[in-house]
Image (cartoon, helix red, strand yellow):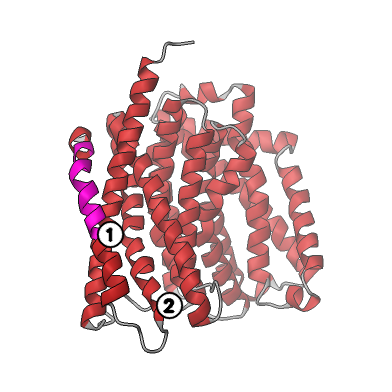
């Protein structure tokens, strides 16, 4: 399965490139300028579509962790690691683009809002996951312990969301772009952005899988010291 | 049949060690008092005395203090080489986890009582206004911390710099306990009824992580 996934990079690469070109073209030339917020609202087409890949990456980390603990096959661990790293990139993008949009619109770089806070906690969970991998002595132990933390971390996400919701009460974010009833061209740009970023996510994931596999092959060839 | 016996043996051993040497509980008690004094003096007087701040302050002191004890839980086993014996327990290793987690839970309850006493003396907190609710929150909150903390202490113990790693691993995961418990404590102190959804949320957190930890602990101890 891993081999097929890695081979799909040949198709995913050009598709992702095309998707990004269409997405950026639509953001600049097609999507209308929002009346109240002005041109700054266009960051919406970067900020919001980063969320599905971020969550998908973390789900893959839990699936990979479960698969590794059950089968002890390294390819599951490589999936978990790749999901965490690529998911973390998208999670970081959400956290960077959010304040850039928030400052002119809400007047603050950061507010302790439900979505912002839970995304930040999610980011911390996966930074901790990568720290654990880096700090554990021995690659077998690192794989096992990281799998356990990946599963526990993913299980904590709904509780974090619930607790932050309870503590903060409300969110300044709209419920979801689909439910907000965006005008035609805005909705179309948002859909294109979501598809393009999912393609970018898939491409980065399979390339990271390939790198992880090459690393494993190199380590297997290296003579014992 | 071996499982409950291993559970009782691990629990009894940890409790005996805690009561015999005070290596763990002593520093935790002093640390809790120190953090309480530092926070109370550093905060503006109005904030420290304000009922709105007290639940969060109490739970923060408790969380920081529990970190000391949880960190020692497996570090001591590792230093003395007894962790190898735990891996050879003649039963499902989940029972070893249950023994360690229960010992940690009881130690944390002791620290909780001490923190509550400090708050009563230093901040005039009247715990008696709704003691059954506060007791319930204390039991469930400490259980959540003990379960997740015991598992993560075992993970951190296998790494370099466990003292640094444990808080990084633990704090994001126990945020729900901190938020729910401080909210519930605040409502109980204000004389309000605690929403049943919060009780369910906290109990569900404890139950879910107890189950996960029981099943994955085998892999943790293996490595």
In the image, residue A142 lies at what x, y percent?
45, 32
| B175, above or below B128, in the image | above
In the image, residue B2 lies at what x, y percent?
41, 28
- For image coordinates 49% across by 61% down, the residue present is A120
The foreground one among A121 and B137 is A121
The foreground one among A218 and A111 is A218
Q: Is residue A11 magenta?
A: yes
Subunit of label 2: A
Q: Is residue A99 magenta?
A: no
- Which residue is label 1 attached to? A20
| A97, above or below A108, in the image | above
| A105, above or below B150, in the image | below
In the image, residue B22 lies at what x, y percent?
74, 38
Which of pointers 1 and 2 lies earlier in the amino acid sequence?
A: 1
- The part of the chain drawn in magenta is A6-20
- For image coordinates 77% across by 79% down, the residue present is B46
The span from disc 1 to disc 2 (Cα, nearest Å) is: 20 Å
Q: Secondary structure at mark 1?
A: helix
Q: Secondary structure at mark 2?
A: helix
In the image, residue A218 lies at what x, y percent?
37, 21
Asked if residue B194 can be seen in this view, the reply is: no
Crowd class of label 2 (few under 14; some 14 to 19; many from 20; radius 10 Å) = some
- Which residue is label 2 attached to? A40
The quarter of the image holding the C terminus of chain B is top left
- For image coordinates 28% across by 75% down, the residue present is A29
Q: Can you tell which quarter of the image residue A67 is in? A: top left
Q: Main secondary structure of the magenta part?
A: helix
- For image coordinates 42% across by 52% down, the residue present is A89
The quarter of the image holding the N terminus of chain B is top left
Subunit of label 1: A
Asked if residue B79 can be seen in this view, the reply is: yes
């Amino acid at each position: 399965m891993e081999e097929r996934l890695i081979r799909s990079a040949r198709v995913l690469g050009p598709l992702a490139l095309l998707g990004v070109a269409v997405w950026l073209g639509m953001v600049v030339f097609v999507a209308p300028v929002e009346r109240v917020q002005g041109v700054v609202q266009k960051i919406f087409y970067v900020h919001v579509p980063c969320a599905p890949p971020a969550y998908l990456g973390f789900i893959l980390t839990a699936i990979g962790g479960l698969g590794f603990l059950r089968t002890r096959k390294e390819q599951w661990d490589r999936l978990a690691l790749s999901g965490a790293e690529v998911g973390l990139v998208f999670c970081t993008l959400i956290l960077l683009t959010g304040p850039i949009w928030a400052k002119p619109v809400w007047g603050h770089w950061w507010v302790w809002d439900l979505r912002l806070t839970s995304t930040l906690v999610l980011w911390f969970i996966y930074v901790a996951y990568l720290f654990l991998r880096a700090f554990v002595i021995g690659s077998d132990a690192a794989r096992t312990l990281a799998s356990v933390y990946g599963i526990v971390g993913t299980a904590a996400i709904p509780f974090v969301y619930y607790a932050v919701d309870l503590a903060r009460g409300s969110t300044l974010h709209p419920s979801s772009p689909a439910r907000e009833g965006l005008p035609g061209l805005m909705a179309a740009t948002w859909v294109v952005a979501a598809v393009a970023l999912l393609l970018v996510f898939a491409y980065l994931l399979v390339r990271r899988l390939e790198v992880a596999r090459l690393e494993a092959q190199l380590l297997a060839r290296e003579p014992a010291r | 049949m071996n499982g409950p016996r291993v559970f009782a043996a691990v629990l009894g051993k940890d409790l005996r060690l805690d009561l015999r040497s005070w290596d763990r509980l002593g520093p935790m008690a002093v640390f809790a008092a120190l953090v309480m004094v530092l926070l109370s003096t550093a905060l503006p007087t109005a904030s420290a005395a304000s009922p709105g701040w007290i639940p969060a302050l109490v739970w923060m002191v408790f969380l920081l203090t529990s970190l000391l004890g949880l960190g020692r839980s497996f570090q001591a086993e590792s230093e003395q080489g007894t962790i190898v014996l735990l891996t050879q327990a003649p039963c499902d290793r989940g029972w070893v986890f249950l023994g360690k987690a229960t010992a940690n839970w009881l130690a944390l309850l002791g620290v909780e009582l001490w923190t509550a006493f400090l708050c009563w003396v230093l901040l005039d907190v009247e715990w008696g206004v709704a003691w059954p609710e506060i007791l319930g929150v204390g039991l469930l909150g400490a259980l959540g911390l003990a379960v997740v903390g015991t598992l993560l202490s075992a993970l951190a113990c296998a790494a370099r710099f466990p003292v640094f790693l444990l808080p990084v691993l633990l704090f994001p995961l126990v945020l729900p306990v901190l938020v729910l418990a401080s909210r519930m404590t605040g409502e109980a102190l204000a004389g309000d009824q605690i929403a049943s959804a919060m009780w369910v949320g906290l109990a569900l957190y404890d139950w879910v992580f107890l189950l996960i930890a029981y099943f994955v602990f085998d892999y943790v101890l293996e490595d």
